[in-house]
Each structure stands twice: as structure tokens, then as C-alpha cells.
Image: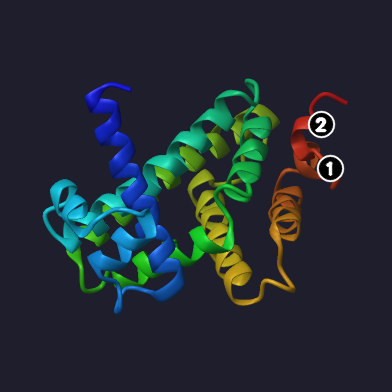
């Protein structure tokens, strides 16, 4: 492993340990010593890669964002050309076990809850929210054009879709026994089925991706 690759691996190791610590204890009691212990490294190593706890937290949030974007973009690219199939892939991605697990959702909400007092967190969260909304709005605009749904406003549909994802993540965090990943996906596809019956009207495993090829 090259020196640069080793440095990046250490950074990721520390950021993943930070995610574990936030999920277990929240922000208030988080210390660099906790992160070091979780990573199996010394506090000196943490200070070598991150000058302060604030810097570590900011970089950890960026790490979460980058992972989310990478997986979502890859799933959408692999879904095919139709907007319906790409939206279905976005649903699958948002509720994939690697993204919508209890640990990750807990940490996302921990960061979102701190945005009122931490402008650095607010800026990063605003950027990912704006980017996600712009991408889903464009997908809905394409779906509306492809399906001939000229009476629908893609911005309004996208805002409802985005809000439902946020709300379902929160439901999974607060009521994990009543709302799981599969149930959340069914809720979203039911919402889309009411607006786009040709593409999402049939609720079955595989969603629009299968319906489009039937």
C-alpha cells in the first residue's frame, strides 16, 4: 500500500470510528480518546490526521455524504435509461442496508440536529439536500415528459418524494418495529403509483424496473 493510500485508509478508519461513537453516545460525550479507542489507535494518531474534534466531525459528515452520493449515483447509472427505472433505483438505494441502517440513520439525524448551532454542518447538509432535490426534480421532469403527465409539477412531486424519504428514515429510527426498509419502499412506490399509474401502479417486488420490462 502506498503512503497516500495508507493515510486515506487511516482517515477513513477514524471517521468510521467517529460514526460508531456518535451512534452509541451522541455528540455531547464524544471525545478524541473515544474515537481513538474505537479505531484501535492512539490519541496522537487522531491528532495527526485531524487538528481538532470539530475538524474530525466535519470530515466525518463529508464522508457520510460522499458514501451516500457514490452509492446512489452508481445505482441510478446501472438502472437503465428510463426515468421510472432510475427513480425505482433511487428508492432501493435510499433504503439499502448499507445506507438506511439504524447506525447510519442515527448519525445523520445527530448531524442534522446540530445544524442550528454549527454553520459548517448546516452548509454541508444544505448542499446535499439541494443536490438531491435537483436530481429528483430532474428525474420527475423526465418521467412526466416520458409518460405524458403534463398536469404534474416536477418540483412539487419531488418535494413530496424527498420529504417522505426523510420522514420514513425518522420512522425507522423511532419505530423500527413498525417501519422497516421494505415497508418504507412500499410507501414510496404507493405514493408514486397514485401519480404515475402506468409506471408504478403495480406494487410488486422489483417495482418499476420490472414493470417497465413486462
Q: Residue at x 40, y 75 (%)?
A: 25
Q: Are marks 1 and 2 in contact (CB under 8 Å)?
A: yes
Above/below status of 115 relative to 69: below
Name which quarter of the figure residue 140 lies in: top right
Q: Residue at x 11, y 54 (%)?
A: 51
Q: Closer to the camera, 165 or 67? A: 67
Where is residue 154 drawn, in percent x and y?
53, 44
Q: Counting other residues with Cα less than 10 Å from the Cα at mark 2, is it few (<14), some (14-19), or many (20 or more)?
A: some
Where is residue 80 drawn, in percent x and y?
65, 21
* Residue underneath mark 1: 205
| First in sequence: mark 1 vs mark 2 | 1
Q: Residue at x 55, y 49 (%)?
A: 99
The N terminus: image quadrant = top left
Name which quarter of the figure residue 21 lies in: bottom left
Q: CA distance from mark 1 to mark 2?
A: 8 Å
Kind of element beneath mark 2: helix
Res. 109 in view? no
Res. 70 in view? yes
Q: Which mark is residue 118?
A: none
Q: Closer to the camera, 180 or 17? A: 17
* Residue underneath mark 2: 210
Q: Closer to the camera, 135 or 66? A: 66
Above/below status of 70 relative to 126: above
Q: How is the image coloured?
A: rainbow
Image-based side of 137 in relation to 182, left or right = left
Q: Residue at x 53, y 49 (%)?
A: 158
Where is residue 144 drawn, in percent x and y?
62, 36
Image-based side of 169 in relation to 132, left or right = right
Kind of element beneath mark 1: loop
The C terminus: image quadrant = top right
Amino acid at each position: 500500500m502506498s503512503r497516500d493510500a495508507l493515510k486515506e485508509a487511516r482517515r477513513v478508519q477514524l471517521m468510521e470510528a467517529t460514526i460508531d461513537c456518535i451512534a452509541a453516545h451522541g455528540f455531547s460525550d464524544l471525545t478524541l480518546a473515544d474515537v481513538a479507542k474505537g479505531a484501535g489507535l492512539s490519541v496522537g494518531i487522531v491528532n495527526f490526521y485531524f487538528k481538532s474534534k470539530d475538524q474530525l466531525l466535519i470530515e466525518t459528515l463529508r464522508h457520510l455524504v460522499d458514501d451516500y452520493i457514490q452509492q446512489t449515483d452508481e445505482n441510478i447509472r446501472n438502472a437503465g435509461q428510463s426515468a421510472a427505472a432510475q427513480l425505482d433505483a433511487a428508492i432501493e438505494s435510499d433504503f439499502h442496508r448499507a445506507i438506511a441502517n439504524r447506525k447510519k440513520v442515527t448519525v445523520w439525524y445527530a448531524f442534522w440536529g446540530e445544524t442550528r448551532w454549527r454553520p459548517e454542518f448546516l452548509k454541508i447538509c444544505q448542499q446535499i439536500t439541494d443536490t438531491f432535490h435537483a436530481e429528483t426534480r430532474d428525474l420527475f421532469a423526465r418521467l412526466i415528459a416520458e409518460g405524458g403527465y403534463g398536469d404534474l409539477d416536477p418540483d412539487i412531486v419531488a418535494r413530496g418524494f424527498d420529504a417522505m424519504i426523510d420522514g420514513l428514515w425518522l420512522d425507522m429510527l423511532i419505530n423500527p418495529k413498525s417501519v422497516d426498509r421494505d415497508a418504507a419502499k412500499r410507501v414510496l412506490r404507493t405514493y408514486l403509483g397514485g401519480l404515475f399509474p402506468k409506471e408504478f401502479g403495480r406494487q410488486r417486488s422489483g417495482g418499476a424496473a420490472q414493470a417497465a420490462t413486462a
